Image (cartoon, coloured by chain):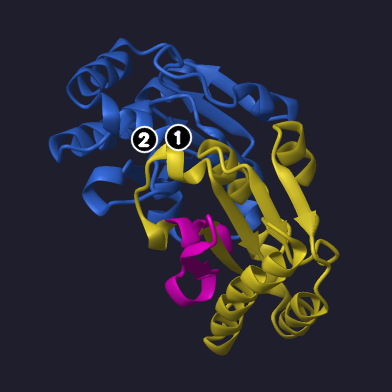
Chain colours: A blue, B yellow
Amino acid sequence: MNDLNDQAFLEYAISAARQGASEGGVPIGGALVVEGKVLGVGFNKRVQLGSAIRHGETDCLENIGRLPAKVYQKATMYTTLSPCHMCTGAILLYGIPRVVLGENETFMGAEDLLRSEGVEVINLNSQECKDMMAKFIKEKPEVWNEDIGL
Amino acid sequence: MNDLNDQAFLEYAISAARQGASEGGVPIGGALVVEGKVLGVGFNKRVQLGSAIRHGETDCLENIGRLPAKVYQKATMYTTLSPCHMCTGAILLYGIPRVVLGENETFMGAEDLLRSEGVEVINLNSQECKDMMAKFIKEKPEVWNEDIGL
């Protein structure tokens, strides 16, 4: 998979994050891609559903539903923000071998853990992803802190 | 908190697991306890909801909903089975400082990671927890494998 494809697939996660933002939620989105096909997308639903576990990546996995391990093992998880410990754990649980993230300046997740377990992690350093988070954190800092356990 | 309390609170997680079993689901349950109060319980809903992220612990967190960090930071997560990477990550995300588990013979989760991050992990070595899992795995080995990404 080349960089151009990664940018294109990250756009699905960004679109999901925008949808979350439009609903007043934390603007973080995810998309799971297998062999060039987007299996599903998701976005953080802390605000919308009062959820403690629906982050961009986990909501994406939940929207897709049950999959055989062999599918996850060929997947790339696209996410607008560096994955927190929970989403990192979901990626490790299912053996997803590749993660492409929009940025890790707003929040540095458990990328070291992912890499130590053999997961490829690529940062596309997206200004749009940073800008969405900066806007949200300025408006609702307490929600963002809650989302990362602070 | 003494051992007697831990056994009593683990019973809430076991009861939740039994409920899951009665619905044909993976018999793993969780309960979150703060200062002697059970805030909520949950159980694995892979079968019942076609869920990829509702494990015993994460379903428990989701049923309880949004909580301030200061509540999680005084909590103990009771779970019938050693927490997988995803549930371990949820515990780390929210800074839950203590985990009491029913057993880790059926499945050894990411206990080393929990301990390396300063979480206290106690194994009550429950025969009932082991028996529930043994029965389920004998009946539906493919569902169990799917639940742990195999």
Residue A139 figure quarter: top left
**Mark 1, chain letter?**
A
Residue A149's label in the rendered image is 1
Assess whether residue A11 is covered by the magenta stretch: no
Mark 2: which amino acid?
Answer: Glu
The residue that mark 2 highlights is A146
Residue B83 visible in rendering: no
Assess whether residue B57 is covered by the magenta stretch: yes
Provide residue A68's location: percent of width, then percent of height.
60, 60
Residue A9 figure quarter: top left
Query: B40 and B60: which one is in front?
Result: B40
In what element is the residue under mark 2? helix
Kindly identify the residue that appears in the image at 47 percent across and 40 percent down.
Answer: A33
Kindly identify the residue that appears in the image at 55 percent across and 69 percent down.
Answer: B44
Query: A114 and B121: which one is in front?
Result: B121
Residue B135 figure quarter: bottom right
Query: B136 and B28: which one is in front?
Result: B28
Provide residue A31's location: percent of width, then percent of height.
40, 39
First to last magenta residue range? B34-61
Vertical placement of residue A131 versus A149, above or below: above
Left or right: A135 in relation to A68: left
Count of marks, rendered view: 2
In what element is the residue under mark 1? loop
Quadrant of the frame with the N terminus of chain B: bottom right
Distance from Cα at disc 2 to Cα at disc 1: 5 Å
Vertical placement of residue B115 versus B51, above or below: above
Mark 1: which amino acid?
Answer: Gly
